[in-house]
Image (cartoon, rainbow, N blue to C red):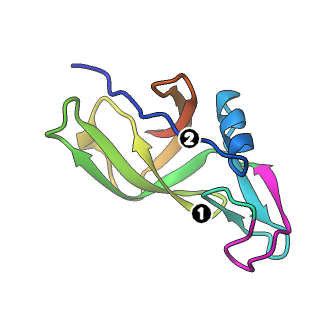
């Protein structure tokens, strides 16, 4: 079976720090300083308040599968999923495993970083 090629992201000024951290194996998200809530996708303004009072924070990379879909007819097959992180946000991502039949909603997962087409590391999740 062929290994799946991950398309390269296109960082911009608001997300560059996120992608730089990913290259270092760190999952970095933004936090609203007015509410204390962590959010994803990184952006300058809080989705909770509209305020630019935000900062970067390193998160655990632990979460649970909220929902998933295995694209079994793709070559090679792969899984896309919503993963709810321990810190609160739910992210759209890929789940990597050798056995898609073992996946379950609510299953614990942990972040890994894989190289995309241009070498930029991208966060994906693997069952614990």
Task: Classify 8 as above or below 18.
Answer: above
Tell me where residue 3 appears, x and y as whole percent: 31, 22
Other residues around mark 2 within 10 Å, as few (<14) / some (14–19) / many (≥20): few
Residue 94 in the image, given as x and y percentages of width and height: 41, 43
Residue under the point 66% across and 38% down: 19
* Secondary structure category for the residue under label 1: loop
Q: Nearer the viewer, residue 106 or 84?
A: 84
**Residue under pointer 2:** 10
Mark number displayed over residue 127: none
Residue 115 forms part of the magenta stretch? no
Foreground disc of the pair 2, 1: 2
- Please determine whether, in this image, residue 34 is positioned above or below residue 31: below
Q: Residue at x 73, y 69 (%)?
A: 37
- Mark 2 and mark 1 in contact? Answer it, CB < 8 Å: no
| Alpha carbon distance from label 2 to label 1 | 22 Å
Asked if the stretch drawn in magenta spans residue 46, the answer is yes
Q: Which residues are magenta?
A: 45-57
Secondary structure found at label 2? loop
Name the residue tied to disc 1: 89
In this view, the residue farthest toward the left is 73
Mark 2 and mark 1 lie on one chain; the one further toward the N terminus is: 2
Of residues 6 and 99, the one nearer the viewer is 6
Residue drawn at x 41%, y 32% is: 6
Q: Is residue 33 left or right of residue 11?
A: right
């Amino acid at each position: 079976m062929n290994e799946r090629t991950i398309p390269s992201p296109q960082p911009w000024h608001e997300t560059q720090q996120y992608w730089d951290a990913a290259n270092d194996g760190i999952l970095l998200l933004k936090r609203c300083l007015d509410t204390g809530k962590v959010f994803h996708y990184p952006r300058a303004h809080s989705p909770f308040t509209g305020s630019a009072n935000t900062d970067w924070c390193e998160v655990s990379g632990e979460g649970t599968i909220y929902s998933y879909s295995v694209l079994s007819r793709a070559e090679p097959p792969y899984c896309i999923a919503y993963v709810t992180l321990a810190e609160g946000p739910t992210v759209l991502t890929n789940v990597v495993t050798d056995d898609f039949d073992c996946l379950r909603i609510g299953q614990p997962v942990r972040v890994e970083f894989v190289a995309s087409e241009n070498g930029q590391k991208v966060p994906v999740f693997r069952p614990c």
